[in-house]
Each structure stands twice: as structure tokens, then as C-alpha cells.
Amino acid sequence: MNKTNYQVERSIPLSDSVTSRRSFLVNSALGAGALTLGFHVPGFAKDKPKASTQGQEVEVNAWVVIHPDDRCVIRIARAEMGQGSSTGLAQLVAEELECDWQKVSIEFITPGQNLARDRVWKNMSTGGSRGIRESQEYVRVAGAAARTMLIQAAANQMGVSPSELSVSKGVITHANSKRTLNYGSVCADAVKLTPPDAKSIRLKKPQDWQIAGKGVRRLDTAHKVDGSLKYAIDRRAENMLYAAVKASPVFEGKLKSFDATAILKKRGIKSVVKLDDYAVAVVADNWWRAKTALEELPIVWDEGQNGQVNSQSIASHLEEGLRSDKNVFADTNVGQFSQAYAASSQKLEAVYSTPFVTHACMEPMNCTVLYTPEKAEAWVPSQNAEAALAALSDATGLPLEKCEAYNQTLGGGFGRRGGPQDYVRFAALVAKQYPGQSVKVLWSREEDMTHDYYRPIGQCLLQAGLDEKGDLSALSIRVSGQSINAYLAPHNIVDGKDRRQLQGYWPEPGDAQFGYSVSNLKIEYAMRNTHVPVGAWRGVNTNQNSIYLEAFMEEVAKASGKDSLAFRRALLRDHPKHLRVLNAVADKAGWGRTLPSGVFQGIAQFMGYGSYTAAVAEVSVNNGKVKVHRLVLATNSGHVVNPDQVAAQVEGSVAYAFDSLQAQSSVLNGRIVETNFDRYKITRMVQLPKIETVLAPTFDFWGGVGEPTICVVAPAVLNAIFKATGKPVRSLPLQNSGLELV
Amino acid sequence: MSKLNINGKVHSIDVEPEMPLLWVLRDELGMTGTKYGCGVAQCGACTVLVDGAPVRSCSFPNAAAQGKKITTIEGLSPNATHPVQVAWKELDVPQCGYCQSGQILAAAALLKSNPHPSDEDIDQAMTNICRCGSYRRIRAGIHAAAKTGKGVPSVIHMVSAASLLGEGVAAGNNQLASANEVCSSHTGCAQEAQTPCAANGFSSNCV
């Protein structure tokens, strides 16, 4: 292991220096990838539908099950963590299926089923705002294929050509003879037919949609208002055991020893279990007893050199990367930045910084495992159920075929539960000690916030040159900070270039394109890693990169003497979709309208997850108290499957965006300081402004929705603060500048 | 053995008196609608009503609840018919839903003491954390349950594909262009919208 304070202060690849813990976490995270590579992935048409084993329902194909009474069950492979895509995906299937929406329900498939059927449901991983955009085509094709077969079956029964039939709400009509047949009455015959060739299927145009594109109610709300929905944490079983866990509070520290003598005498305590080489679990008959005993357990840790690290030393480490030539690459380098900057009439330079922040899913990390030497089952809240299955197999030593994971509705995901399945591993390791008995491992909130995969810390040096007309002639962006890929997915770093950290600054169109045209433009990344684990935090690197860019552009706009909107519009001239969404938000917000005294507007735009976003914030600042009065948030996500749920995501994005402004996970003596909500500044209702959603779809692409608008909120607010105070806020959280969101 | 009156039913329990009510409910009695979120009375996911008042059960010793009437989400109403639950369904308030048992009980307690709360009253009373950010709809849901007239659905401005730039993409493909809920693009939507639109849960002031 590297002996410096920064264990990932190392050249790429990391394979020679990863710790054993990181290695298994990464392997677990990659488990689903291994499944992908290891198994043939056929099209739906090649998959043989499974005969019904209970009741008389018929699986028309992998995605569509129809009951004789016309009830329609639509299968969902992606995780539901509140983002609503299970309803959206059902809308897309139902749209093509032409069934009665009032008779639709959803059913989540398991990774074991997916594996057993050659991954007929394809990718189950749910992150990167991909739930709908990545699966919309094949689920719609499946819906259309099922419809085709149902119509053919009806045609056969009626003795007519399918072309003479029409279908609406699951009722097939032969207009000439006025005969009708319901889906429920033909589904048993339909399943015997050969599925149509996927290439022959023509999907509906969005303007013809009747179910998709509409703000229908979610299919999963009822059980969330009466306490009946069972999350993974709610798993109950006969003779169940409960475990609380504690890992070395200093990342990558080791467990040296513990003395269980005293706590084993306490009521309900069953055992104390060492987990790998860095964590311990107390097992009891009630979780509170386990947690209370764990707090009393004397533990000796080997903290290693990381016990010396603190936020200040990390900041110095990143600062070095702002001007260093070492371990830096330029992703964009057009024109001649240095010469143009030197020749510019007006020069601006600023350093911005963003802290580590934590996910804090409302449902803390947990998993319940029932292990026997013949089979292992896990009840999980995972964003990637196949990775959970792989982690279960890895930890129990049982082959994948003898494992199953039942993914429940997640109490929040936000990226925390998509990569390493550490909570699954812990539960499996404890459960292996108790064959035949279900064991629920639940992390306390403190443990959850002490062992996260934090949003990467970063700093950014920005330099801009204006020519004599006040136009931006040169721009340089140097990001220095931690890399998610270096920690979790080193294989994504190609030729030493970790492009992911420059999300939103990429020149190529499609996912997260830089929108401004500057003739001399340089964009670089200096990888500076720390010992703190990092991962995807809803919106990932768009959050920090949008703040650096858009807050600095506000400084440049002011220096140029131009209006914030007009300045940006001119620079977006080559990127009409970026420009269009900016125009849309300015229009709906009433950019430049007369505001109450003391209220100021800020504006920002950015692209991520295939969608274009922009925001206007209306903010006042009084004695350091920042009040956001109104937010108008615009997105062009290409298509809108459910406008009401897109609005829910846009509104919801404000909570994480406000975290971006006010929260931080700081480091002292190698460990995280803010370990519960009493110290971590988390977004509360009182801080929420009026929020308006602007939907501006152009119907020529499919973008994501769950993450994109988060990244424009914080810079829009910062730019309004700048207008209000005349001082740019460059260091987050806001408290660093004596400001507080109220 | 001691007794707890939960949702009108008396349960006998044999636990340490200091065990928080939350863990009696969840691990001893199997009533999992009440959630664990922080353990330090900060997030409100564990909110229950004790003699009608909202209490954070993660930090409330079960002994302190003895002799009192405890209401959990499972017992708030038969068939989820409490006005707050009805409003929650109508407005699709929950996202992941994990915090909503606590939010609903906190909201029910607020409306009992203050049947017609203002936004400020709601903000003061509703300190529960929601990480999905359903706060806007929680506020709207409380107004809807209280019938204050401010329980409006989300404010959504639709911008047609062809507007703003006259960009030649997918001409005519705005699936919503023929429906009434579309608000055409024009400056003047600047005031905060409060008037609901006709269809599909849309609300906009710029129709």
C-alpha cells in the first residue's frame, strides 16, 4: 500500500495498488457486467414464454402477462426508487399493447429469473437516468409484439384477416360483423403463435400516444400512504436475527481486535462477527439491542496513515493539481488558449471548490439474507439487482444459480445503491454464520453517513479573456479533484484519461455536451485522489462542473458588461438545443421582469444524461440569510412519458441541489465528521421555494429525467446571490462565505 | 410484561423500558409501517401519534408510551381514507415513499390542531426530511386535505417543439399540442401560477 496520506496518489492503472477491500467491492460492482458478458442476450422473440404455473394467466411474452379477466401485468426489470420509471415503462408497454390502462399492474422480475432466461429482460441496472431512455425501445417493441399476437389469435378465432380488426383498451373489434373479443379470451391462443419479427414492428408516433405522454397517476402510490409497502428494511421472518455493523471509521483502516465479553452477557445478544478485515457485526434478537451493544463494544482499529488526513490536507492536495503539469490531460484544446489569453483586453481568473457530500438515502443501507448450504436468498434495496446477486454469490461461495435476490422498492437510491453492494456482502457474511435463519443487517444512520461513496471533492481553476469588444475570446477550465472511475471502475480510464470527471464539458453531442462556442478553449482534468471512497451522487459530476462553469460565466458576463442571458445566448449560437431550453426558461420565468425590492434573478444552463436543462432562480440575501423565492426549471428530455412524474423529478431535484449549496461531509483524522442529520445540513421543507417546471421536448431523442435539472439549480442560485451581493460565491458550502440558506 | 395501546388494540410486551417505541413496533410487534431514518429525532421517518401528538418514536422510550393511545400509519384510518392519505394519492405526493408514513402522521397532527394552515404554518410544523424532495407536493397535499384552495398540482409549462428558435426538429411532433393542457409559449407566465389547468394533473397559468 502506498505510504502517503493519499492512497490513490498513484499512476493509473490502479490494479497494483488497490486494497483487498476495494478489490472485492469493485468485483461486486462489476458482477452484473460479468453476467452481461457471460450470457447470450437474445431478443424477446427468441425467448420461450414460460407456461403458467398458477392461475390461468398467460405470459404472452416476457414483458406482458394477461389474465382471463383482462387484467394485464407488465413486468419491470429496472429498480423503482421513487423516480417513477416503473409507471413510465408500464405506460410505454401499455401504449403499444393497446390494453386497458385501468387493468394494468406491474410486477418486478428477479435477477435469478433474468439469469435463468438468458437475460430476456436485459439490463436491470438503474442509474444514470437510464431507466426509460435505455429500455424504451425494447419494451415498446414487446408491447407491440404482444398486441400483434393477440390480434392474430382473435383473427384466427373469428376466421378473418387481422387487417380487418381494430383494438382499443384490450377489446378487439371486427367492424364488419360487429363482433368483439377481449384480450383475456384470446391470450391462451395468442401464446401458441410464433412471435413476430421485431424488425417488422412499427412503433407508434408520440403524437398518437393515448397512455404514454399523459400525466397518469403512479401505479405504486397506494401502498406508500398506509404503511403497507414492504421495503427491504421491513423484511420479517420466523426467528429472524438482526445485526448492527461498524466498519473502521477511518477509510481503509483495519479491525485489530474487539472484546465481546461484556456485551455477550446482555439481553438478546447472540454473537459478535468479524466481517472481512475491517468491520464487525453484533447479532441480536432485536436491532436496537444489537446497535446499543455495538456502541458499547471495545474495538481497536488500525487506522494506518489515513488517520492523519483532514479536509485541509485534502484541499492542499487538490490545489496543487490546479496548476501542475503532473497527471493532467486536456480533453478539449481548440485554438491557442495561452496566446489568446495573453493577448486579451480583460482577464479574469477564479478558483471554485465543491466538497464531498453524502447520499443519505432515507432507508439506510440494509439487506436480509437467508442462507443454507444449498441456497442463498437476499431481500435487497439495490439499484442493480444483478450486482446484488453477484455479491451474494461471491460472499456465500454459492454459484449464481443457487442464489436469488428479491429487489424491493428502494427507500431512495441516488447512486448509492448502484455500484458496490457492500450492504449485501455484509448481510451474506453474517447470515452464513446462521444457516437456515434469516439475518437482517441494518446500518445505523451514523454508519450510513460514515461509509458512503461520496460525491467527489473538487476544485476548479477558470481563466477567461475578453477581447476589446467584451466578447469571450479565451477560456480555460482546469478541474482538479477525485475520480470516481479510479475508485470504482478503473477500466473506464483509457490511456490515463478519465473523461467522466469532465461530464458536461464534453465536445461531442449526445449525453453531456459543452454548449458554449469559444474560439480558444482548453478543458483539462488533473486527477487528485484521496482515501475517501467516491461514487455516483444523483447528477454525479454535472453538479460540480455546472457550478464551476456557470458561476464563472456569470463573473465573465458581468465583466463584459452584458446581460447574463444575452451573454450566454450569444455563446450558445452553435448549439440550438442548449439555446432553446435557455430561452424557454427565460421566457417562462420572465427574465428581467420587475421584482420586489431586494429580489434578484440568476440564470444557468447545462447538459447531462442526454437532456438539456436551464434554470432561473429568484433570490434575496439579507444579513447572510439566503432565501430562494422561486425556481423555474426547464428541461428538454426529448420525450416526455409522464409529464406529472417528470415534474415530480424536477421538483425533487431541488432537494439534492440545495444539498449542493449547503452540505458537506468533511474529514478530520481520516474520518467523516458529519455522521447524522444534526450536523449534516440537509434540505428541509422550509427552504423550498415555489417551483415551476418547464417541459420543452423536441421528440427527436430520448434523454434522462431523474438527474439533469439538479445541476442547474445551484449555479442559478449562486448567480442570483452574486447579483444581490456583488460578490461571487466560489467556495461551497455557502457557510464558507458566511451565507446560509433559509 | 407491560402493555401498549396501539391503534386501539392492547399489546403485551416484554422489553427493556428504555427500548425506543420504534423498535418495539418494528422488531417486537412486526408493525413496519413506521420507519427508521436517523435514530436521533432529526428526520421524522419514525413519527407516530401519542395521544394525538406527533412523537419521534426512535427517541421515545416505550415506557413513556404506556397508558397512552398510540397511532401508527397502519391505524390512522380504515382503508387509507384520512383526508391526508386521500390527498397524497390524488397528488401522487410520494416518490420512494419511505418518509411518507412520518410525513402523513405529522401532517394529520398539524391539521388536527390547525385545520386551515398557511404555507408558513406548514413549513414550521413539517420538519420531516424527504430526500426525494417531495416537499412541494407535501405542502400542496396538506392544503388539499385542508381544502384551503391552495392544494394545486404541479405547475408545468409546456413549450411546443417548434417554438423558441423555430428549430426544425420533428415538426408537428408535439403529442400534447392538440390537448387543452398545453400552454403556448409567451412571456407573461412570470407570475406564480396557482390556477389548475384542465387535464392530466397539469397546472399552469399560461394557457
Image: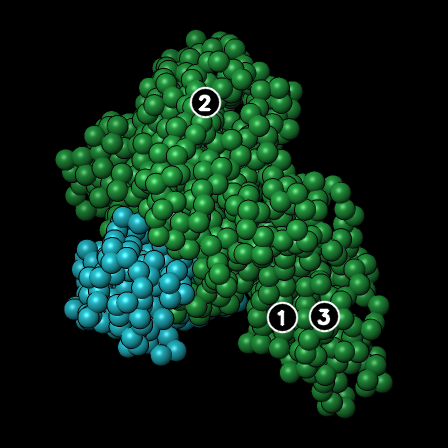
Using the rendered image of the protein, determine whether residue B110 is visible from the camera's viewpoint: no
Q: Report which colour depicts chain B.
A: cyan
Type of colouring: by chain
Question: Which percent across, then down, holds residue A308?
Answer: 37, 18
Amino acid bearing label 1: Val
Left or right side of A570 for A425: right
Amino acid bearing label 3: Glu
Residue located 16% across and 68% down the image: B114
Residue projecting furthest to the left: A623
Chain letter of mark 1 equals A
Front position in the image: A620 or A383: A383
Residue located 50% across and 24% down the image: A518
Front position in the image: A656 or B71: B71
Instruction: List the residue tagged with mark 2.
Output: A530
Helix, strand or loop for disc 3: strand
Sort mark 1 into few (<14), some (14-19) or many (20+) by Cα contacts within 10 Å.
many
Question: Which percent across, then down, holds residue B181?
Answer: 44, 66
Question: Which percent across, then down, holds residue A275?
Answer: 51, 37
Sort mark 2 into few (<14), some (14-19) or many (20+) by Cα contacts within 10 Å.
many
Front disc: 2 or 1? 2
Instruction: List the residue tagged with mark 3.
Output: A59
Q: Report which colour depicts chain A.
A: green
Chain letter of mark 3 equals A
Task: Give the CA distance from mark 2 to mark 3.
Answer: 51 Å
A171 vs A565: above or below: below
Image quadrant assignment for residue B146: bottom left
Instruction: List the residue tagged with mark 1.
Output: A73
Amino acid bearing label 2: Thr
Using the rendered image of the protein, determine whether residue A627 is visible from the camera's viewpoint: yes
Q: In the rendered structure, which disc, 2 or 1, sits on the residue that comes first in sequence?
A: 1
The C terminus of chain A lies in quadrant: top left
